[in-house]
Image: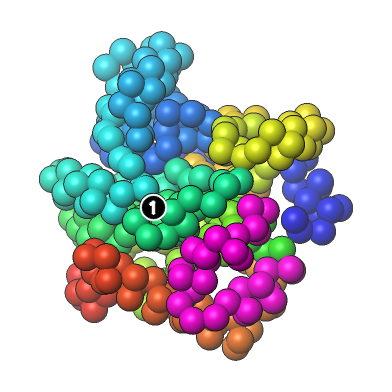
Amino acid sequence: MPKITKFVRDQYTTLPVPQPPADMASATYIVTGANSGLGLECAKHLVRMGARRVIMAVRSRSKGETALSAIRSATGRPHAGEVWELDLASPDSVEAFARRVDALDRLDGLIANAGVAMSTFELVGGMETTVMVNVISTMLLAFRTLPKLSEWARRGGKLTNLVIVSSNTALEPELEQKVASLRGDVFDALSVKEGFAPFDQYPMTKLLEIFAVRQLASIIPVSTSGVVVNTVNPGLCYSDLDRNLGTMARLGMAVTRRVLARTSEQGSRTLLHAAFAGPESYGAYCSECQVKESDIPAWITSAVGKSMQKRVWTDLLKRLESIGHGVDIEALAAK
């Protein structure tokens, strides 16, 4: 965790509710993991702000419909919102979801909020579950929705937004040596049971997200894509992120949250800020409803850090190709 005094100060920062874009009444947004916690509150804000379409991407349709019913009741918009199924443990599910996205008439923003933290080692598709969900499938979703976001940016004459929800735990100084010590393919190294450490794995996946987004931004400038790509830290919030952790870990989280946590609604404001942010946030790290590149440690921005960034990127593209979900980055850059 970042330096404790800064962390506490950040947690107690008053967060504003960001002002929506002027064309909100005709806008379309997608929020993943929208049936609970931050995703639910973010979707609720978007509905309350008057967005024409708010697509709640969820693994469980029944839970999604229950959440949507609650949002409609809370906002007084009985016909707002829709539920689409998305299982980030399955790249095939991501592809099916992306085909539906491709049929949309417009897309103003994707808020990739869904993620997991695991206390036990589990493989899915040959990769550790946290790695698959938080990095492989999340970035695949980003790659597959980027063309639609770019298309609307051109047709609509406005910037669109692609937000990857990360975490300040990714900036822990201990991760510098841990990521540098990974041997061979990054994703193989993080999918070995003997090396699995629950309290390291989640922050590591959030760090890989930051590396991937920064590399994507370095390859495809916002002037070419029209899409503002960024990462956001919602801070410590009340949520069900710890649902897959062990009893003692959940107890520890409960105690910490009682003292320091934001509500899910407060945390969701940071997601909205990133989703409405302009080119000043391109490739950047956002936190406390601000662009906070100053929070990114030197070991990430240094020459060594950029080398690791490229390594993560290369391994990511190779992995997607090897599992049958390759990405043509040159084609994306040309759009």
Looking at the rendered image, the quarter that the N terminus falls into is bottom right
Q: Is residue 196 magenta?
A: yes
The answer to which image quadrant residue 178 occupies is bottom right
Tell me which residue sits at (53%, 35%) in the image.
38
Is residue 143 left or right of 228 when viewed as pictured? left
| As drawn, 332 above or below 136 | below
Q: Quick one: quadrant of the C terminus? A: bottom left
Where are the magenta residues, as a range?
173-200
Main SS, magenta region, reads helix
Residue drawn at 55 percent across, 80 percent down: 183
Residue 293 lies in quadrant: bottom right
In the image, residue 149 lies at what x, y percent? 27, 55
Under tag 1, what secondary structure?
strand
Left or right: 79 in relation to 248: left
Quadrant of the image occupied by residue 329: bottom left
- Which residue sits furthest bottom? 303
Q: Is residue 332 above or below residue 100?
A: below
At horizontal 82% and vertical 59% (from top left) the residue drawn is 3
Q: Position of residue 85 (x, y in %)?
A: 28, 35
Most distant residue in the front direction: 194
What colouring style does the render use? rainbow
Magenta stretch holds residue 297: no
Which residue bears the numbered disc 1?
A: 124
Q: Nearer the viewer, residue 72 or 180?
A: 180
* 198 to 279, vertically: above or below: above
